[in-house]
Amino acid sequence: MKTKQEPLGFTPEEEAEKQRLRVEIDCVTPPDGAQLEKIRAFMAERYEVPPEDVDFHIKRDPSVVSGFKIFAGDDNYDWSALGRIRQLRRSFQSLRPETGHDKIISLLREDIASFSLDSGFQQVGFVQSVSDGIVRITGLNELEYGEIVLFECGVKGMALDILSDGTSGIVLFGNDSEIFQGMKVLRTGRTAGIPISGKLPGRIIDPLGRPLDGKGELEAKQYFPIERPAPGILDREPVSQPLETGVLSVDALFPIGRGQRELIIGDRQTGKTTLAVDAILNQKDKGVICVYVAIGQRAGAVAKVADILHKHGADEYTVIVSSTASDPAPLQYIAPYAGCAVAEYFMLRGRDTLIVYDDLSRHAVAYRTLSLLLERSPGREAYPGDVFYLHSRLLERSAHLSDKLGGGSMTALPIVETQAGDVSAYIPTNIISITDGQIFLESELFYAGQRPAINIGLSVSRVGGAAQFDVMKKSVGSVRLDLAQYREMKVFSQFGGDLDASTEQRLRHGAALMQLLRQDKHTPMTLHEQVITLICADAGIFTQVPEKEVKAYQTALLAHFENNHPALCVRIDHGKTMSDKLREKILEGAKQFQF
C-alpha cells in the first residue's frame, strides 16, 4: 500500500518568517521609540514590506560612538556621527587648493547651508572563508568584476571571481591574518586605481601608489583607474616617429617607433633588462617620460636599476612601479596595469612615454597562481584560458594618439624570459602575436662576448624603416644582409679549405660589423655617432682594420669627428635627412683620420 507523500515546501509559519525583514542596529545608545518608528517607516518604504514585518535586532558596538549603523541583508546605512562627517567632508572636496583665502569662508558657508544628509547607503557582505590570500564572501549581489572591496580591518581586495551561487572570490592586497569568518566587507563602488599627479617622475611606488623611496607622500589628488579601454583605430596615428634607444644594433636594424610594442625576449641573464634600461637612459633631454615596472623581481635587482638611473640622471624623468617577489600575487598581478596607467596619464596630456614591463612571464605566473587558488580550470601549462586576454588588453593600450587627442604616445618594451631559448612556449608565442616585433637575445652570443647578444635572424621590427630618420635609413645600407651572409659563410669556413678573395673579404667585413655592434652597457650612442659608424662601415673603412682593433678604431674615429668636425655632427643630429653631399663629407672626414 502506497503512502501519501506530503507536498514539499515551507510551512505557513516559515513562509511568514521568510518574508519578514531583519534589521540590525549597531549603536552605543539604543534608539528610543520615536527613532525606531522613523527607522521602521524608512525600511518599510525602502524594501516595500508592511511596517509590522520589520524586525529589529539591536547590538551594542562602541566603535559607532554616536548615532546608528543599520544593516538590512547586504545593505548598510551609516547614520553614525562619523558617517555624517564623512559626507560633509566629501561635499567640501570641490574646493580647490588655489582658492583664495577670502573666498574659502564664504564658499564653506554656502556649502554648509546647502548640505543635506543622504541615507548613508552601503552594501555589506560577510566573509565565508579565507585561505592563501583568497577570501570567499557572501552577499554583495551587485558586486562587479574588478571592483575594490574594503574589509573591516582596513585591508583592501579586488573581486576576481563572481559565482552564480551568490558567493564571490576576493584577492587580497594585504595580509590575510586579520581577516576571519563573519567579518563585514564593504563595496567601494570603484575599480582598482592609483593616485597620480604630474609630480610622479623621480619616485618609486608600489602598484597601489604608495611611496617606497622614503621621500614622503605623493600629494596626488587624482585617482586614475588602472584598467581602461585601449584607444580605438580612429583615435590613433600611424607609427612614424622614431624612439631612439642609443643601441646601434637596435636603432639600425630593428628600429622602434613611438607608439610601438617591441618585445625583448631571451633566456635568463642575457641582458634583457640592461637593453631596456639603456633605452631609458637614452631619453634624457628628449622630453620622454619613462616608466619601469618591476614584476616579481628581487628587491635588490630593483634597487640596482634605481641606482643606475640615478647615476645617469635618468631618475628625473622616470617612474619606477615595483612589486617585488616578496609581495603577494595580487600586487604582482596589477603591477603592469598600474604602470600602464601612469604612462597613460602622461600620454593623454600630449607627452611621449616609454614603459618597460620587466617581466610579463612572472606576471603570467602570478595570474596563474590567483586563478588556481580561485579554482578555475587550468589549461595549457596550467595557465587559465584567458591568459592571452591578460596581456592583449595591456599592450593594446600602447599607441600614438591622433592630434585631436593631444598627439601623445606610449611605447612599450615588454620583457619575456624563455627557457633554453624556447620561443615556442605558451607565453612567448602569445606575446609575440600581440607585439609589433621582437628582439631575441641569444645565450650563445652573450657568452661569446657579443653584447647586446641580439640574434639578427630571429629578431624583427614590423614597423621597420617607417620609424627611422631619413639620415639613419640611408646609412644602414646592406648591413643586415651582410651579417646574414657572414653567419652562413662562417659556418662553412670552419670546415677548412682554401677560400677565394671575395669570400675572405666578406668574412672580414662581417667580423668588423659584429665588432661594431658590440656596445658597452649604459653607454648609449648619439645619432651622429651611429650614422658615422654605419657610413664608414658600408664604405669598408673598418674592414681594413684588424678585428681586435675595430672597437678602438671606432672610438678614436668618433672622437676625431667631434673634435675636428663638430658642425657636421650637429647637422646630422638636427638635420635628420641624408644627402649625397653629407655622405661625401663624412667619408672625407674619415679619410683625414689617422689611427
Image (spheres, helix red, strand yellow):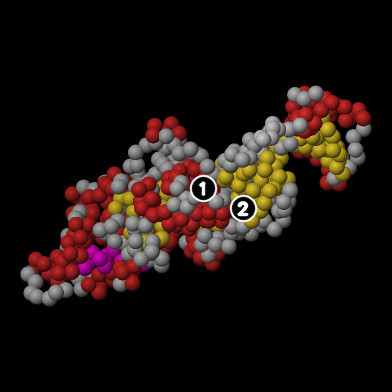
Q: Is residue 94 above or below residue 461?
A: above
Among all residues in the image, which is located at the extreme front? 1
Q: Earlier in the sequence, mark 1 or mark 2?
A: 2
Q: What residue is drawn where x is 57% and y is 45%?
A: 161
| Percent x, y of residue 259 | 39, 44
Q: Identify the image quadrant of the C terminus.
A: bottom left
Residue 131 lies within the magenta run: no
Q: Amino acid at mark 2?
A: Ile
Q: Nearer the viewer, residue 530 or 444?
A: 444
Q: Which residue is mark 2?
A: 134
> Residue at image x 27%, y 47%?
465
Q: Work out whether residue 52 or residue 431 is closer to the camera in this orientation and state it.
A: 52
In this picture, which residue range is highlighted in magenta? 510-525
| Left or right of residue 319: residue 417 | left
Instruction: State the SS at label 2.
Output: strand
Local crowd size for mark 2, using a 10 Å CA cut-off: few (<14), some (14–19), many (≥20)? many
Image coords of residue 531 (percent x, y): 27, 56
- The percent position of residue 373, horizontal first and vertical second, equals 56, 54
Instruction: Give percent across and percent down for residue 241.
Output: 35, 44
Asked whether the viewer can see residue 18, the reply is yes
Report the disc number at residue 448: none
From the viewer's side, name the closer residue of 570 and 552.
552
Task: Give the residue at x 58% y 41%.
Answer: 163
Packing grade of label 1 (10 A; few <14, some 14-19, many >=20) is: many
Instruction: Give amino acid for label 1.
Output: Tyr
In magenta stretch: residue 516:
yes
* Residue 174 in the figure: left or right of residue 461: right
Instruction: Residue 224: name its quadrant.
Output: top right
Q: Secondary structure at mark 1?
A: helix
Judging by the rendered image, the residue that carries numbered circle 1 is 337
Which of the 4 quarters of the picture holds residue 70?
A: top right
Q: Residue at x 53, y 51 (%)?
A: 371
